[in-house]
Amino acid sequence: MSRKGNKLIPIPQGVTVTINPNDVKVSGQSGTLTVVYPSTLIKVENVENKIKVSRVNDEKQSRMFHGTINSNIANAIEGIHKGYQKHLKIVGVGYKASVSGNKLTLAIGFSHPVVFEIPQGLKVTCPTPTEILINGIDKIVVGEFAAKVRITRKPEPYNGKGIMYSDEHIIRKVGKTAEGSKK
């Protein structure tokens, strides 16, 4: 049995969930998200203001989708209710970020600035030149954009320079020393 798939998802105040034959629409004051699911394998129903996801049969394909669809619906409800946020910090001499319009511009040690087009539905701000806040209702879009920004200059272990998540800890390496070469 799937522990994740059997969890009931409560619907908070201000969020409406519409269940259609092949998708679930979650809407609220911050926007609308749609979760598509295969109705031949998974059954979604509203039971006492809670969403219940169950399998139609016990085949392998149904078992695979059960927990995933439940998590996707739960993420959509939480995104509409609270939203998602990623906080990136930039470490390095002269490294900085700025937002103008729908473009994020990074100066991170290359000979040219790196420019990102901000996807629809995301709000990107730079409270300081070395911080980037990414807010949105879709967990996948927020995480994917944060990962794209981070991968342009991953943090390196010797000096600790690069773009990293605010709660990320970089394990530092010592580097070559005179002691190591005497052996």
Image (cartoon, rainbow, N blue to C red):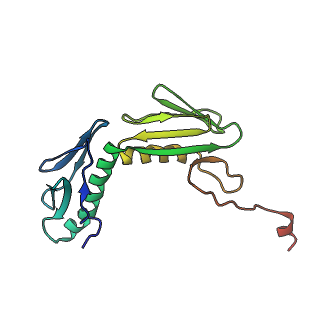
Relative image position of residue 33 (x, y in whole percent): 27, 42
Q: Is residue 40 above or below residue 149?
A: below
Q: In this image, 137 relative to 161: left or right?
A: left
The residue located at (69%, 36%) in the rendering is: 94
> In terms of depth relative to the viewer, which is nearer, 178 or 54?
54
> In terms of depth relative to the viewer, which is nearer, 113 or 120?
120
Q: In this image, 94 relative to 150: left or right?
A: right
The residue located at (60%, 57%) in the rendering is: 169
Task: Name the quarter where the C terminus is drawn.
Answer: bottom right
Q: Answer with the quarter of the image where residue 88 lies.
A: top right
The residue located at (54%, 48%) in the rendering is: 151
Task: Name the quarter where the N terminus is drawn.
Answer: bottom left
The residue located at (25%, 54%) in the rendering is: 10
Q: Answer with the quarter of the image where residue 109 lies.
A: top right
Relative image position of residue 23 (x, y in whole percent): 18, 48
Relative image position of residue 11 (x, y in whole percent): 24, 50
Q: Is residue 33 above or below residue 73?
A: above
> In terms of depth relative to the viewer, which is nearer, 111 or 144?
144
Q: In this image, 112 relative to 120: left or right?
A: right
> In terms of depth relative to the viewer, which is nearer, 73 or 183?
73
Relative image position of residue 13 (x, y in whole percent): 26, 44
Q: Residue furthest top?
A: 101
Q: Answer with the quarter of the image where residue 92 lies.
A: top right
Q: How many marks?
A: 0
